[in-house]
Image: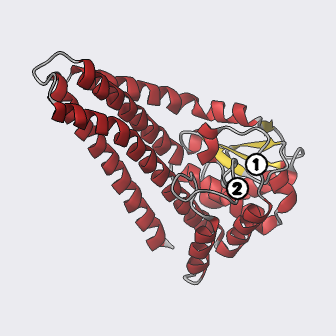
Amino acid sequence: MYRAIAKNKRNTVFTIVLFLLIIGGLGWLAAAIYGNLTIVVITLVVAIGYALIQYFTADRQALAMSGAIEITSKAEHPRLWRVVENLSITTGTPMPRVYVVSDPAPNAFATGRDPQHASVAATTGLLELMDDAELEGVMAHELGHVRNYDIRLSMIVFGLVVAVGFISDMLVRMAFFGRNNNNGNPIVMIFGIVAMLVAPLVATLVQLAVSRQREYLADATGAMTTRHPDALARALLKLEAYGRPMQRQNTSMAHLWIADPLKPGIVDRLFATHPPIPERVKRLQEMGGSF
C-alpha cells in the first residue's frame, strides 16, 4: 500500500518537472527568435494569474456545472451523510460539505483547494447502485483526493498548460512576422512551427498523465483508509458495467469524477482523463494482499 502511494507521488513529481522543462525550452526558443525575454515573462505572469483565479473559484464552478445540491442536514440523505462523516472521523479531516447530483449515471467527485474548504458529491445513480461497503470505498477515494491536495495540483498544471499554449502561439507568430536578427532564417522558422504544433500536444499529454496518477493515488489512499480495497474494486467494476454519459456533461471537469462522465467504457487510453478501470481494479486487488 505505502509503496504504491510513494510510487505515484514520484511519478507525479516527474511529470511536473517535465512540464517545467517544456516551458523552459519554449522560453529559450522564444528568446532566440525575438531576442527579448519580456514576452515570456508576461505570458507566465498571465498564466499564473489565471491559475490563481481558478484556484479560488474552481470548486464553486464545478458544483454549479454539475447541478449539485447541498445536503444541509443528515435527515436528507442519511446514508451518504453517515458514510462521509465516519470517513472524516477516521481520517481526522474536517467534515466536507456534502452534495447530491440528480443523475441516473453512477458517479462521484470531490473539489476544494484544501481539506478545510472541501466538498464531495455523489449522483443519485451511485447511491442506488452501490452497497454500503462500495459506497464507503467510493467516498474514501474522493476524500483521498482532498487529503492529497489533488485540486491544488490540477490548478497548477492547468496554469502551465495555458502558459505552453500562449508561448507556442507567439512563437509561430514571431517566426513568420517578427522583425529581428533571425528574420527570414528558415531553421528558426521550422523550429518555431514544430514547437507550436508539438508543445501543446505534449502539454496536454502531461496534464492527462498527472490526472491518471492522481486517480491511482486516490484509489490507494481510499483503500488504505477503509482497509477494504476489494470493496472499491467492486465499485469500480460496477461503474464500468453500468456507466453512462451524464446528463450535464462538461469536458473541463471530466477529470474530477471517479469515472469518465463523457465516454464510459470506450475511453481512448492516450487521451483519457482516467486510467482504465481494469488496471485500477488489478492494482487494488494486488494491494489487498498486502494487508
Kind of residue at disc 2: Pro
Residue 36: percent from left, percent from top = 17, 21
In this rendering, the count of numbered labels is 2
Position of residue 152 in the picture relative to residue 188 (left or right): right
Rendered image: mark on residue 162 = none
Coloring basis for residues: secondary structure
Q: SS for tag 1?
A: loop
Above or below — where is 147 with respect to 132? above
Report the front residue among 174 and 108: 174
Rendered image: mark on residue 245 = 1
Residue at numbered disc 2: 264
Report the front residue among 198 and 68: 198
Kind of residue at disc 1: Pro
Report the front residue among 76 and 190: 190
Q: Quadrant of residue 19?
A: top left
Q: Quadrant of residue 9?
A: bottom left
Above or below — where is 117 with respect to 206? above
The answer to whether mark 2 and mark 1 are in CB contact below 8 A is yes
Q: Residue furthest left?
A: 181
Identified at 54% across, 82% down, the residue is 290
Identified at 50% across, 48% down, the residue is 149
Q: Residue furthest top?
A: 179
Identified at 22% across, 29% down, the residue is 30
Above or below — where is 268 with respect to 51? below
